[in-house]
Amino acid sequence: MAYWPHLYLLFFILIIWGLEKRFPKVMERAEENLLIIVISSIMLVSFGQVIARYGFNTGWDAALEFNTIAFSWLILLGMSYGIKTSLHLGVDIVLNAVPRPIAKGLSLFGAAAAMLYGLILLDSTWLAMLGVDVRGGAIEYWSKMFRIGIGSEELRYPAFIQEWFGVRPRVQRWIVLVILPISLALLSYRSLQAFINIARGKRDMLISGHEAQDLVKENQNALKD
């Protein structure tokens, strides 16, 4: 298997790391805005389909495939963003019941497990060094789609794009699937960041805390007022 996708992903992560060090606020807003754009596109296409279907008895043939792909992008990008911002839900009853050093150790284990999970899904061939008979992963699957060049089911380029660049009508599947290796690389990177921050005491746990309980306490007398 070619290793150039690995190098590109490593270069991508290094660029993300450098930009976040240099422009932390800008990168944070950029990541949030990307998720907002994906969510907004799903809403706009869905709303447009309802108007087109029931108002004009027409519609976009690729709407379902587009929304399915966009929703998968939202989930895959949300994995790393949730770890970065401690938005993932989890059961913290054990972490709150044990002494702080043990809770820190469990949080470190969780971050390490999340990073390992991302790396295995990204490319499991490295497990062969541990004697595990396994192969495949997101990189290999994406590389296969890139070599084959198969198109999507319904997504098609606009006519002017086809004329200007001489491309095939259907959007290549490797383009819509490029989010797979990128998101898993980001998941591993964010998990590593969380591991380092927990080890340094800058972060308590991988999952979200008690924001819901805090909000309830803050607003428990709101109805009385």
Image (spheres, rainbow, N blue to C red):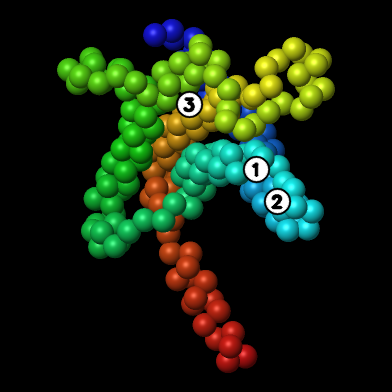
Circle 2 crowding by C-alpha within 10 Å: few under 14, some 14–19, many from 20: many
On the image, numbered disc 3 is attached to which residue?
181
Q: Residue at x 79, y 53 (%)?
A: 56
The residues tagged by marks 2 and 3 sit, at their Cα atoms, a distance apart of 31 Å
What x and y, as percent, mark residue 178? 54, 26
Residue 204 visible in the snapshot: no
Q: Residue at x 52, y 82 (%)?
A: 220
On the image, numbered disc 1 is attached to which residue?
63
What x and y, as percent, mark residue 122? 40, 26
The residues tagged by marks 2 and 1 sit, at their Cα atoms, a distance apart of 7 Å
On the image, numbered disc 2 is attached to which residue?
49
Earlier in the chain: of badge 2 and badge 1, it is: 2
Q: In the figure, is residue 197 to the left or right of 41?
A: left
Q: Residue at x 31, y 38 (%)?
A: 113
Q: Residue at x 64, y 24 (%)?
A: 170
Q: Looking at the image, which residue sits at the far top? A: 2
Determine which of the numbered discs, if any, sits on residue 142 in the image: none
Give yes or no for contact between labels 2 and 1 (Cβ–Cβ under 8 Å): yes
Q: Amino acid at mark 3?
A: Pro
Circle 1 crowding by C-alpha within 10 Å: few under 14, some 14–19, many from 20: some
Q: Of residues 103 and 43, which is closer to you in this image? A: 43
Q: Amino acid at mark 2?
A: Gln
Q: Of residues 46 and 105, which is closer to you in this image? A: 46
What x and y, as percent, mark residue 188? 42, 32
Earlier in the chain: of badge 1 and badge 3, it is: 1
